[in-house]
Image (cartoon, rainbow, N blue to C red):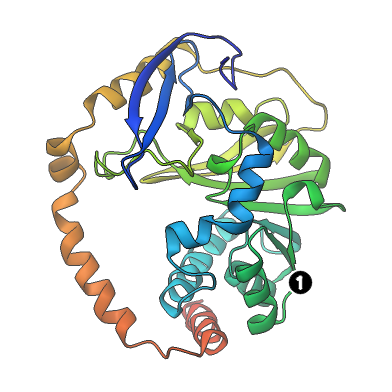
Amino acid sequence: MNCILCKQENFKIVSRVDSKNSSLLMVVLCNVCGMVQQNPLPSEGEVNEYYSNEYRQDYKKTYIPKIKHVFRAGNLAIERLEVLKKNGIINGRLLDIGAGGGEFTYISGKLGFNSKGVEPNIGYSEYGKKEYRINLDTGQLADISGQFQLITMFHVLEHIPNPVLTFEKLWKLIESDGSVFIEVPNIETNTASPHNIYFRAHIHYFSEATLVASASPYFEKIYSEKNSNLRIIFRKKEIKGEMALPNLKQVSHVTKRLEDKGWSEYLIRGEGYKKFFSRVKQTIVESSLQKKDSLGLLNKLIKESMDKG
């Protein structure tokens, strides 16, 4: 297999085990460009079938969102909209790819955007249409047509076999001077348990350098955040360019970060010891939620956000 990014075949094995179920899963680091990816890569057909039918059950243990998932997604939607607002992006035609139950599509539509979502899982997409009465289609990126001023993909790109081809498709869907807001797990973080990193569902594991490189022929970075997740806002290039691969320093950095991952780093520098207490607090808060009022919950979050200004 050749690297999806640089097309070379020069790999180092970083994992052989799926963290979810301990089955065989080969994950490799490209020694040339620093891309971390499954080997071999699944086909697009295999991935589409998995996300249409199995993914939500495997990872959420449900075919429709639970109220705690709505609560988490609603809070994340408010937070992500604040990031967009900070960068002067407050309205326009918005497409949310991998929309889940539709919480971001609904909230963004109430806070200035003309929002549309697309979600491959029929249980989640039908839930969003029924609960929130939003424009939410069941389908894949390949099913989308039209032009948008903003496209959002939150924890989607790591599940797609070819991120470079995906950015090309986004480039064709984005209007002149339009933006793409991407969020993916950060492979360089020290906040992930060393036994909870590599999964069948995650095909690629991005650093900031490899994510920017994947987009580089079509988009330029205008904003980034690096924590446990990477958040990057890209602006469309008017003319397609050449790919700018990570430099040697960036490749060395991600290589060292993978070597340094371990329990001591996670518990101390990554403050993993605090996670038990934060989960207890989260459980207490979520146990008080009204079980059947997803719409009311999102409207409450919107009101609280507007009251804060």
Q: Nearer the viewer, residue 247 or 50?
A: 50
Q: Is residue 128 above or below residue 259?
A: below
| In the displayed structure image, the side of residue 120 where residue 297 appears, left or right | left
Q: Which quarter of the rendered picture does the N terminus lie within? A: top right
Residue 175 seen in render: no
Give the total of numbered labels: 1
Badge 1: few (under 14), some or many (20 or more) residues near its Cα, within 10 Å? some
* Residue drawn where x is 47% and y is 83% of the image: 304
Q: Is residue 56 above or below residue 236?
A: below
Whole-percent x and y of residue 217?
71, 25
- Quarter assignment of residue 90: bottom right
* Residue drawn where x is 51% and y is 36% of the image: 203
Q: Nearer the viewer, residue 88 or 282?
A: 282
User: Badge 1 is on which residue?
Assistant: 135
Which residue is outermost to the right?
146
Whole-percent x and y of residue 67?
45, 80
* Residue drawn where x is 48% and y is 62% of the image: 57
Q: What SS does tag 1 mark? A: loop
Residue 79 seen in render: yes
Q: Is residue 78 above or below residue 248?
A: below
Whole-percent x and y of residue 190?
26, 39
- Quarter assignment of residue 108: bottom right
Q: Nearer the viewer, residue 110 or 16?
A: 16
Name the residue type under label 1: Asn
Q: Nearer the viewer, residue 170 or 203?
A: 203
| In the displayed structure image, the side of residue 173 where residue 298 appears, left or right | left
| In the displayed structure image, the side of residue 103 where residue 149 appears, left or right | right
Q: Is residue 214 above or below residue 1?
A: below
Whole-percent x and y of residue 125?
66, 69
* Residue drawn where x is 52% and y is 27% of the image: 210
